[in-house]
Amino acid sequence: MRTATASATVPLEVSPWQRLLGVYVRWSSRNPWLASVLPFVPVVVAWAAIAKSGLFPPVFLPGPVEVIQKFGTLMPTSFAASSTFVPLGAATLLPSIVRLTTGVSLNGRALRR
């Protein structure tokens, strides 16, 4: 018959990546928006670094700051002043309301079955 022996607990070594993942999980559980935003940070940083390095001409790969600036200048002049476009709110609001009510009604029917 075997007897139980007391074994010494050995502390587990935690790698820096596991610590970083633990910090991310704790922060994202407290702030859910962080889990949505944080994955895009490395992508935008890489985009800015590649654009800044000059590897590609700015015509083909502008930096994120230039894109945001250009969007800010084009948005009021292109869409609002153009006679070919209906104002953005009226053009998208009604179809969106129709889609939303259709989806909710179809989902409600599926749940009742």
Image (spheres, grey):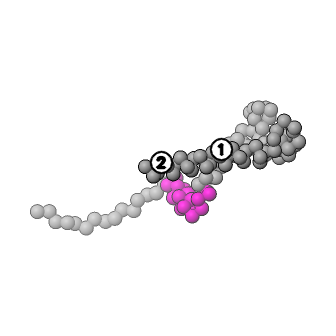
**Alpha carbons under labels 2 and 1: distance apart:** 39 Å
Q: Main secondary structure of the magenta part?
A: helix
Percent of width and height locating residue 97: 67, 49
Residue 5: numbered disc: none
SS category of the residue bearing label 1: helix
The local crowd at label 1, few if under 14, some if 14 to 19, many if 20 or more residues have their Cα within 10 Å, is few
**Residue 47's quadrant in the figure?**
top right
Percent of width and height locating residue 88: 78, 45
Front disc: 2 or 1? 2
Furthest residue in direction bottom, as rendered: 6
The local crowd at label 2, few if under 14, some if 14 to 19, many if 20 or more residues have their Cα within 10 Å, is few
Percent of width and height locating residue 21: 52, 55
Q: Is residue 13 left or right of residue 74?
A: left
Residue 110: numbered disc: 2
Q: Which residues are magenta?
A: 17-34
Q: Using the image as rendered, state which of residue 32 and residue 110 is in the foreground.
A: 110
Q: Is residue 91 left or right of residue 83?
A: left
Percent of width and height locating residue 41: 66, 49
Residue type at numbered disc 2:
Ala
Residue 43: numbered disc: 1
The residue depicted at 53 percent of the width and 46 percent of the height is 106
